[in-house]
Amino acid sequence: MKCTIPAVLAAALLFVFPFRSTGQEIGDLLGQERVNTITTAVPFLMISPDARAGALGDAGVSSSPDVNSMRWNPAKYAFIDQDMGFALNYTPWLRSLVPDINLSYLSGFRRLDDLQVIAFSMTYFTLGEINFTDEVGNFLFPVKPNEFSFDAAYARMLSENLSGAIAARFIYSDLTQGQRAGGMETQAGVALAADVAVYYQRELAWDNTPATFAAGLNISNMGNKISYTDEVNAEFIPINLRIGPSLTFDLDEFNQLSLMVDFNKLLVPTPPIYARDDSGGVITGDDGEYVIERGERPDRSVVAGMLGSFTDAPGGFREELNEITISTGVEYWYDRQFALRAGYFHEHESKGNRKYFTLGVGLKYNVFGLDFSYVVPLAQRSPLENVLRFSLSFDFAALRAEQRTP
């Protein structure tokens, strides 16, 4: 991707630096509600990294366990029916505009015994190559912005139907590689975070049809704020609450159908509405801070930001509900070897207006599986439009068993 300094700064705002909206900036009306989106640092942590969940409308907190459960609910690993496996996932990003932005995701797990499983994953997000220029457009040097995270998790059965997990995450974000941007010295951002998750699964009968009910909860990315410059306050990473149920029907010996829904809410402060004078300027108080007309001050501690995220929206309870995104998915398996998937993702118009259908297929044969997904945007263009995502997974235990077979 070839850009000048202004484009670099725009990319920084879009991908890394959350901006503080004023009352005028969020004053665009959609019906009776203001546009008031929530932004965080390192948003790549919220991109669906695997094709299976990507085909299910980004739903995965209570779907059946698989090798990529780390992103959605690491507690699912305790119920996985394999001893060891890993997966490679690849997601092109903004491919309709530039050719070299993508997200790669590697995940794996190892069962220790009947009760315990350990897992890991690594996410790498590259923004391609950006050319820095001077004020008159002369080429200075190229930079290759990138971000990555490394995760490790421990999952354990807590009872016959319940499991829990904790995960630790190291996050590294290098947007400008130490160069000056916008007249400021920059540095790579570093954060440490943790996930806490639970998963419940129980077999039942639905109108004489064998079925499995599952529910999951995952609070992810609970960690310190991240900073890219000594001159700018640190910003929240995307601390997120994900919760939802699923229901799987074993229609007969060969056919299986699953329905699922996820509800997501960012546990970070909602931008307030700042007071303005008659000329439209933002009013500054005696302490030098902007005067808030509605809402709460966003520069709070991590704990205060998480707890206050349920009550700090300037539009009250209705706006808090608007901050919940909904992911729904349907998955059909034939003979546990061929899968068809579809989903829908919904975000309120005042919070970003992301709405899209998703489609996908999956193939599983002996020791490997292959999944594909595709996004059909509805309300606005998507960074994933005209993009085919894929995942390749391996079951090492099945491979060893196959090798031992005479």
Image: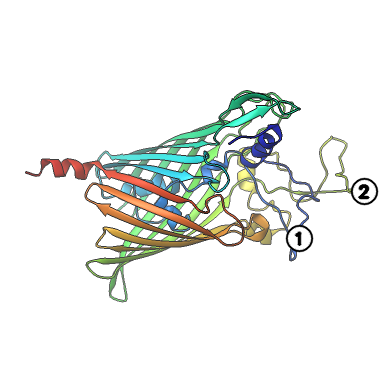
Q: Where is residue 267 in the image (x, y as percent from the top left)?
A: 59, 47
Q: Does residue 68 lie above or below 137 as drawn?
A: below
Give the amino acid at mark 2: Ser
Q: Please name the residue that numbered disc 2 is placed on.
A: 279
Disc nearer the start of the sequence (1/2): 1
Q: Please name the residue that numbered disc 1 is placed on.
A: 29
At horizontal 56% and vertical 29% (from top left) the residue drawn is 144
Q: Is residue 263 left or right of residue 164?
A: right
Quarter-of-image position of residue 323? bottom right
Q: Where is residue 35 in the image (x, y as percent from the top left)?
A: 71, 56
Q: Where is residue 326 in the image (x, y as percent from the top left)?
A: 53, 60
At label 1, counting other C-alpha atoms closer than 10 Å, the crowd grade (few under 14, some 14-19, many 20 or more) is few
| Residue 175 in view here | no
How many labels were placed on the picture? 2
At label 2, counting other C-alpha atoms closer than 10 Å, the crowd grade (few under 14, some 14-19, many 20 or more) is few
Give the amino acid at mark 1: Leu
Q: Does residue 99 lie above or below 311 as drawn?
A: above
Real-space CA distance between mark 1 and mark 2, rounded to the nearest whole angstrom? 20 Å
